[in-house]
Amino acid sequence: MVLTAGFCLSFGGVLLRSMETSDGWLVMFYRSIAFTLTLLIVVALRSRGRVAEAFLAIGRTGLLVALISGAGAISYIFSLLATSVANTMIILALTPLCTALLAWAVIGERVRGTTWAAIAGAVVGVVLMFAQGFTEARVMGSLFAFGAAVGLAAMIVIIRRAKTVDMLPATCLGGVVSALAAFVMIASTTGSFAISPHDIGLLILLGSVQIGGGFSLLTLGSRLVPAAQVSLFALTEIILAPLWVWLVVDEAPATFTLLGGAVVLAAVVGQALMGLAEERRA
């Protein structure tokens, strides 16, 4: 589930780059609506129609997840709009390290030596992938990306801590948080919610499949996989993101991108295989 989540999330950069508008709050507003509706349908199916009960069950912990999820989504979108996709991805590669440290500090979840080695390998691989793009980084975009990395790490750790509770409704509420924030910002500035049909179609894909599908699988998978490994497996997003740009806008990846992608892929696959071997021994 977590590997597939990374696959879904990998389409974010190419979808945003294909849009006609560059207004981050408009993108955030419509993307959040599509995301919320998608997760609401998933919650209704999983709870067999007992939607109200599912939302009430998340408690205060779920509300915290919702706030962190909403803030992280805003940071992610504005990072992609403010700086290069390469720079956003290299900073997001810090997520496994942030997750491992938070999981150790907050819930006492031991991080295996093999996981630390895989995290180190993944970070090295991403640095190789985006070495050129990193030098062109903009400060604000970098700060937004770091905020998204820390937010995702905190979300994963909290879900792991409350793993007996289905936090998918909380993730759904995260979409409400980001939509409300975008609504207030648009209403207080331009006051115009107009957007082209072309962009609406892309934003529906962004909210329902890319973010909606990705975060649904990430939320469900986080209950079953150690926190440090969750964010490590989700790095498949970073491997695939440059490939979609290559296929869609004919931007061929550089040699270092291919080399770094191979290192990240080796780290992710190696960690997955070691995890399966440990399960069999247990």
Image: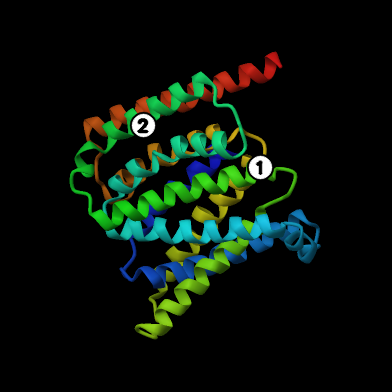
Q: Looking at the picture, does residue 124 appear above or below residue 72?
A: above
Which amino acid does the dot numbered 1 rest on?
Arg
Return the mark for residue 161: 1
Q: Quadrant of residue 140?
A: bottom left
Which residue is drawn at the image coordinates 41% and 77% (left, top)?
185
Which amino acid does the dot numbered 2 rest on?
Val
Q: Quadrant of the C terminus?
A: top right
Residue identified by numbered label 2: 123
First reached walking from the N terminus: tag 1 or tag 2: 2
Q: Looking at the picture, does residue 141 appear above or below residue 23?
A: above
Q: Is residue 73 left or right of residue 218?
A: left
State the residue in front, 197 or 69.
69
Regarding mark 2 in the picture, which secondary structure is present there? Answer: helix
User: Would residue 193 be seen by someone viewing this image from the given angle?
Assistant: no
Q: Quadrant of residue 60?
A: bottom right
* Label 2 crowd bin: few (<14), some (14–19), many (20+), radius 10 Å: many
- The percent position of residue 271, horizontal first and vertical second, equals 51, 23
Q: Is residue 90 left or right of residue 252?
A: right
User: Would residue 190 be seen by someone viewing this image from the given angle?
Assistant: yes
